[in-house]
Image (cartoon, helix red, strand yellow):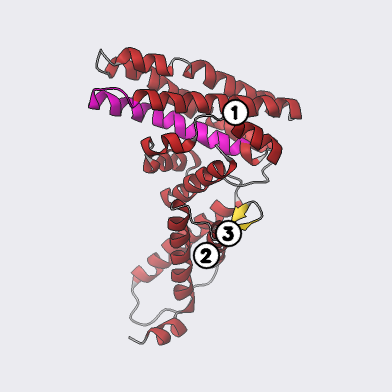
C-alpha cells in the first residue's frame, strides 16, 4: 500500500492518528520531565498536548451529522469503529475544556463545590484507613494507627473549610482553605513515609494501598485550590510543603490514582491518566 496515497484518501483518519501520536508522545515526555521550554505558566510539551487533544476533539463527528460515504466493502464494523473514535475524541475535548484539577482559571465557587463533591469519597477512603489497622500484623498495627490518627479530623476540617469558602468566597476563607489543604497533604505524605518502614511485607502493602486513596483525593484537592490561587499564594503554600511529592511519588500507584479520578468524574481511564499526570506536573513545578 502506498502510504501517501492512503493519507490522501483518508485524511481525517491519518490526521487523527498523528494527533493521537502527538498526545501519547507528549505524555511520555512530560512523565520524563522534558518540557522543551516554557509558554506562560505552562510548558511547550503541555501546550502541544493540549492543542493535539483539542484538534482531535474537534474532528469528532456529532451524532446528528450525516454519515460519510463508506467503501462498498465496508461492513457494520466501520460505523462502530467510527462511533468509538468519535466518542473518545469528544471525551478528550471535554477533558481540555471542562475545569478540572489541573486547569487554571476556574472560578473559586466551582472549585469549592468540586472539593465538597469529593467529600463522600474522601470520608469513605478515611474510613477504610481506620479499618485497615485491624487487618495488619499486630506488631505493625500501632505504628500505622499512629501515622494516620489525624486523618479524620483533617478531612473534616478540609471539607468544612471548602463549604465555608463556598458560602463566602472571600480572600480570608480562601487563605484558610489553602492552609488546610496543604496541612492535610503534608499529613498524608508523612504517613506514607512512616508506613513504608513496616517490616511485614503484606502489612506494608495493605497500609500503602489504604493511604493511596486518601493521597489521590487530597492531591486532587490541592490542584483544585492551586488553580484559583495567585502565584504569591501558591508560593506560600509550597513553602509550607516540607515533604515534597518527589519524596512519596515512588510509593503511589499512578494507575490506581487514575481509576479513582475516572470513577469520580465518570470519564474514560485514558482521560484520567492525563489529568493525574498533568496535575502532578503542575504541583511539582509549583514547588510541592
Question: Where does residue 79 sit, x and y in percent of width and height?
Answer: 40, 69
Q: Which residue is mark 2?
A: 56
Question: How many circles with numbers are drawn on the protein?
Answer: 3
Badge 2 crowding class, 10 Å Cα cut-off, few under 14, some 14 to 19, many 20 or more, is many
Q: Residue at x 45, y 31 (%)?
A: 215
Q: Which residue is mark 3?
A: 37
Q: Marks 1/2: CA distance?
A: 40 Å
**Looking at the figure, which quarter contains the N terminus?**
bottom left
Q: Residue at x 23, y 23 (%)?
A: 200
Q: In terms of image quadrants, where is residue 101?
A: top right
Badge 3 crowding class, 10 Å Cα cut-off, few under 14, some 14 to 19, many 20 or more, is few
Query: Pointers 2 and 3 in contact (CB under 8 A)?
Result: no
Badge 1 crowding class, 10 Å Cα cut-off, few under 14, some 14 to 19, many 20 or more, is some
Residue nearest the observer in this picture, 231 or 278: 231
Above or below, 70 against 51 in this view is: below
Per the rendered image, the range of residues in magenta is 196-225
Residue mark closest to the camera, 1 vs 2: 1
Question: Where does residue 176 sit, x and y in percent of width and height?
Answer: 67, 24
Query: Pointers 1 and 2 in contact (CB under 8 A)?
Result: no
Q: Residue at x 44, y 14 (%)?
A: 149
- Report whether residue 230 is seen: no
Lower position in the chain sequence, tag 1 or tag 2? 2
Is 200 magenta? The answer is yes
Question: Where does residue 219 sit, x and y in percent of width and height?
Answer: 51, 35
Q: Secondary structure at mark 3?
A: loop
Q: Marks 2/3: CA distance?
A: 24 Å
Q: Which residue is mark 1?
A: 240
Q: Secondary structure at mark 2?
A: helix
Lower position in the chain sequence, tag 2 or tag 3? 3
Q: In terms of image quadrants, where is residue 29?
A: bottom left
Amino acid at each position: 500500500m502506498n502510504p501517501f496515497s492512503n493519507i490522501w484518501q483518508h485524511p481525517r483518519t491519518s490526521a487523527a492518528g498523528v494527533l493521537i501520536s502527538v498526545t501519547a508522545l507528549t505524555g511520555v515526555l512530560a512523565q520524563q520531565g522534558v518540557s522543551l521550554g516554557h509558554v506562560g505558566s505552562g510548558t511547550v510539551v503541555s501546550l502541544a498536548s493540549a492543542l493535539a487533544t483539542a484538534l482531535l476533539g474537534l474532528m469528532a463527528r456529532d451524532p446528528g451529522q450525516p454519515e460519510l460515504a463508506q467503501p462498498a466493502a465496508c461492513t457494520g464494523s466501520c460505523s462502530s469503529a467510527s462511533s468509538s473514535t468519535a466518542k473518545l475524541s469528544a471525551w478528550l475535548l471535554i477533558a481540555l475544556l471542562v475545569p478540572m484539577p489541573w486547569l487554571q482559571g476556574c472560578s473559586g465557587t466551582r472549585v469549592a463545590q468540586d472539593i465538597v463533591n469529593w467529600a463522600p469519597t474522601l470520608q469513605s477512603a478515611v474510613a477504610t484507613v481506620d479499618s485497615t489497622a485491624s487487618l495488619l500484623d499486630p506488631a505493625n498495627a500501632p505504628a500505622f494507627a499512629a501515622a494516620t490518627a489525624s486523618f479524620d479530623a483533617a478531612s473534616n476540617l478540609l471539607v468544612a473549610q471548602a463549604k465555608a469558602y463556598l458560602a463566602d468566597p472571600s480572600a480570608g476563607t480562601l487563605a484558610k482553605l489553602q492552609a488546610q489543604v496543604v496541612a492535610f497533604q503534608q499529613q498524608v505524605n508523612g504517613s506514607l513515609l512512616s508506613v513504608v518502614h513496616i517490616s511485614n511485607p503484606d502489612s506494608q502493602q495493605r497500609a500503602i494501598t489504604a493511604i493511596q486513596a486518601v493521597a489521590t483525593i487530597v492531591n486532587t484537592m490541592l490542584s483544585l485550590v492551586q488553580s484559583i490561587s495567585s502565584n504569591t499564594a501558591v508560593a506560600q503554600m509550597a513553602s509550607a510543603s516540607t515533604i515534597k511529592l518527589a519524596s512519596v511519588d515512588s510509593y503511589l500507584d499512578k494507575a490506581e490514582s487514575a481509576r479513582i479520578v475516572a470513577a469520580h468524574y465518570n470519564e474514560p481511564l485514558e482521560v484520567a491518566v492525563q489529568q493525574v499526570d498533568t496535575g502532578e506536573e503542575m504541583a511539582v513545578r509549583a514547588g510541592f
